[in-house]
Image (spheres, helix red, strand yellow):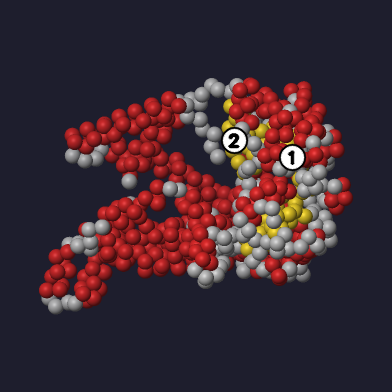
């Protein structure tokens, strides 16, 4: 074994030293799992000669850690709005040269100028959506899922998938209790924690990316999901439906940003412009089923898009929802310690 | 995660280099009748320094410093009291943690205890299953022994993450096993999302590490010793526990080490098969680093883990000073 590792080590060292990376033009993107129709990479390569390398993350928090510790590794990243806010504060983002992104004109103005990036200098919306409950209509009624309270209903013991994502899960619990998703009041956070610990015996699993496929297979009756995952699952299993409870929920925008340390900024801008082109935005939207901020793409999709309430929620649903704001480090310490209690409660 | 790019021809050059290196190695062996010059171990030493010793020192550095790099023991206090940092922040915000019902947080200590318990169970089960298996495989009259070794090795060609995910499709409520149970009229049983499923995943993954060292020792054992014992009047059982068992102890010790250590640090399996309902210490460390972004506390937790492993290693060394059982792997 020792001999083998010696040989392997030597070869690795050799290959790393002797061969420099190829001179090909590249853009390194860091995206959520399953968040893009990857066949567009080929079209992009044909049109520009730039090769797309894709790396993936599961939650915003994981992504932030990687962007901080690997400067230069990523040229295009897809954070949610509250993380854009944090990344601007930490000086991690480069300003996007909008002259290189003419297709940004198609972005719905109502999604621009949010508190996270008031002057639209650093980010361009990529997709938006809501957090809600994906439910099996053969087991749960529409009326029951009009409240987050259904997740605490003992009738559904062992039939609930919660989201293994700290802000989303704490956020919906806070909403259920009538508080803001962005609360910094430790007493409210403590109440939400107790609520989640009380719910634990009913919960089947805490997960993120696995949920949608398991719901398609009928593994549980209720699951907390992002709207796009819900639409993906509903497309494959007609018994599933999606609801945004009355107490309100989270409405979010995932943006495209360029880290300050990006090595291929011009290629990154070309890629972002490509993403904003209506036909490409349409392909992405039809592939991942989140709501598109691209008015050009929406026009191309027509009624398929506008008539679908899950992907194109009515104004009163949006009005019930709340945007996430960045939460400062000292309050996140509280969030994290409480989340640890939830995750390890017996 | 890496975006290291090796061009297509690089693979070929690597292959040629690999073969050339092997040829050189063989020539060297023939000339010197074995590996004699210490120079041959230098790349390995370099490897160990760069990828094992330096990272360990970094972990120690992070464990004993705060975010600003100043010396502190707070990270270890956070292990003992998982609410330590939070309570400090709460006091700074003008709250009284005690009034809010935040006493000492036992999450980290409990998780370590749970991991040790699970690893203990996993080791015991692996031993109970593995020893007879190894014994049968090493029987002189048993012709299928080598075939079984290969069968044990083949699944290990696949990454353990994939094997764990494969278990999910077996154990799910609508998975293969439940489908079979339902077809037999027994009805569905919830097999996944609990500690039992986690334990199953661990035993499945670590069983070969128990079987091989024991098989290795038993295989090399001189059969004449058992024959002599029988000639002198021992029956089968007495031969086993007077001769075979004591002689196989180094293998057993080695097997226990090789199962227990990775079992304590298990992660991913609890998240997949246990549905993330209870974390093991490996998950806790991962979350502390990656989600909570607290490298200092994460390092302190890792250090506690490493010290525990080193201690158990030292303890086992006393029983098996030659390290005989592990020579196969």
Horizontally, residue B63 falls left or right of residue B47, namely right
Q: Is residue A129 visible?
A: yes
Where's residue A218, x and y in %? 63, 58
Chain letter of the residue carrying label 2: A
> Label 2: how many residues lie within 10 Å, few (<14), some (14-19) or many (20+)?
some
Taking depth in this image into account, of A205 and B60 the one nearest to the observer is: A205
**Position of residue A159 measured from the top left corner of the image (x, y, whole percent):** 66, 64
Please give the name of the residue rendered at 79% of the width and 31% of the height, measured from the top-left corner: A296
**Which circle, 2 or 1, is nearer the viewer?**
1
Q: Is residue B71 visible?
A: no
On residue A54, which mark appears? 2
How far apart in space, not on screen, are marks 2 and 1 (Cα)?
Answer: 18 Å
Numbered badge on residue A127: 1
Marks 2,1: beta carbons within 8 A: no
Tags 2 and 1 both on a single chain: yes
User: Badge 1, how many Cα within 10 Å: few under 14, some, many 20+?
Assistant: many
């Amino acid at each position: 074994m020792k001999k083998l590792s010696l040989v392997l080590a030597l070869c690795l060292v050799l290959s790393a030293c002797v061969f420099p990376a190829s001179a090909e033009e590249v853009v390194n993107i860091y995206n959520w799992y399953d968040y893009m129709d990857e066949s567009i990479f080929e079209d992009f390569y044909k049109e520009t000669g730039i090769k797309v390398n894709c790396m993936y993350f599961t939650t915003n928090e994981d992504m932030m850690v990687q962007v901080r510790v690997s400067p230069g590794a990523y040229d295009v990243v897809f954070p949610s709005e509250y993380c854009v806010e944090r990344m601007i504060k930490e000086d991690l983002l480069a300003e996007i040269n909008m002259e290189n992104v003419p297709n940004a004109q198609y972005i719905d103005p109502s999604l621009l100028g949010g508190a996270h990036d008031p002057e639209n200098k650093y980010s361009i919306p990529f997709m938006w959506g809501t957090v809600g409950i994906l439910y099996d209509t053969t087991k749960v009624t529409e009326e029951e899922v009009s409240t987050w309270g259904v997740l605490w209903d003992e009738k559904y013991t062992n039939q609930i998938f919660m989201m293994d994502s700290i802000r989303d899960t704490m956020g919906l619990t806070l909403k259920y209790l009538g508080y803001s998703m962005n609360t910094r009041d430790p007493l409210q956070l403590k109440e939400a924690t107790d609520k989640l610990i009380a719910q634990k015996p009913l919960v089947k699993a805490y997960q993120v990316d696995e949920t949608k496929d398991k719901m398609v297979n009928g593994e549980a009756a209720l699951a907390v999901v992002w709207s796009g995952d819900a639409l993906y699952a509903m497309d494959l299993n007609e018994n599933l439906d999606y609801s945004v409870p009355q107490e309100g929920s989270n409405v979010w925008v995932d943006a495209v940003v360029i880290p300050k340390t990006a090595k291929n900024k011009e290629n990154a801008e070309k890629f972002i412009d490509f993403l904003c082109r209506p036909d490409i935005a349409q392909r992405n939207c039809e592939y991942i089923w989140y709501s598109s901020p691209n008015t050009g793409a929406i026009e191309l999709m027509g009624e398929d898009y506008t008539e679908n309430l899950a992907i194109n929620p009515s104004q009163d649903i949006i009005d019930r929802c709340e945007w996430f704001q960045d939460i400062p480090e000292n309050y996140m310490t509280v969030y994290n310690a409480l989340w640890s209690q939830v995750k390890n409660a017996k | 995660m890496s975006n290291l790019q090796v061009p297509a021809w690089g693979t070929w050059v690597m292959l040629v280099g690999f073969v050339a290196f092997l040829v050189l190695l063989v020539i060297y062996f023939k000339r010197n009748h074995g590996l004699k010059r210490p120079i041959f171990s230098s790349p390995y030493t370099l490897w160990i320094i760069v990828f094992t010793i330096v990272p360990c020192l970094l972990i120690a550095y992070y464990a004993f410093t705060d975010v600003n790099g100043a010396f502190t023991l707070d990270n270890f206090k956070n292990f003992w009291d998982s609410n330590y940092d939070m309570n400090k922040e709460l006091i700074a915000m003008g709250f009284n943690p005690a009034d809010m019902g935040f006493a000492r947080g036992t999450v980290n200590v409990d998780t370590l205890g749970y991991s040790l318990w699970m690893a203990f169970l996993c080791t015991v089960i692996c031993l109970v299953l593995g020893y007879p298996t190894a014994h049968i495989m090493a029987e002189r009259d048993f012709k299928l022994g080598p075939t079984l070794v290969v069968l044990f090795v083949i699944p290990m060609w696949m990454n353990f993450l994939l094997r764990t995910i494969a278990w999910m499709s077996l154990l799910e409520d609508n998975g293969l096993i439940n489908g079979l149970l339902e077809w037999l009229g027994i009805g569905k049983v919830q097999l996944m999302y609990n500690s039992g499923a986690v334990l199953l995943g661990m035993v499945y993954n670590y069983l070969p590490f128990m079987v091989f060292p024991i098989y290795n020792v038993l295989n090399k054992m001189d059969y004449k010793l058992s024959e002599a014992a029988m000639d002198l009047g021992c029956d089968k059982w007495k031969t086993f526990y007077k001769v075979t068992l004591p002689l196989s102890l180094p293998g057993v010790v080695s097997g226990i080490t090789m199962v227990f250590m990775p079992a304590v640090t298990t992660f991913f399996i609890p998240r997949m098969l246990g549905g993330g309902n209870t974390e093991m210490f490996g998950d806790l460390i991962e979350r502390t680093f990656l989600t909570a972004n607290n490298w200092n506390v994460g390092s302190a937790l890792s250090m506690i883990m490493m010290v525990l492993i080193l201690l158990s290693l030292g303890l086992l060394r006393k029983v098996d000073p030659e390290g005989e059982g592990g020579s196969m792997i």
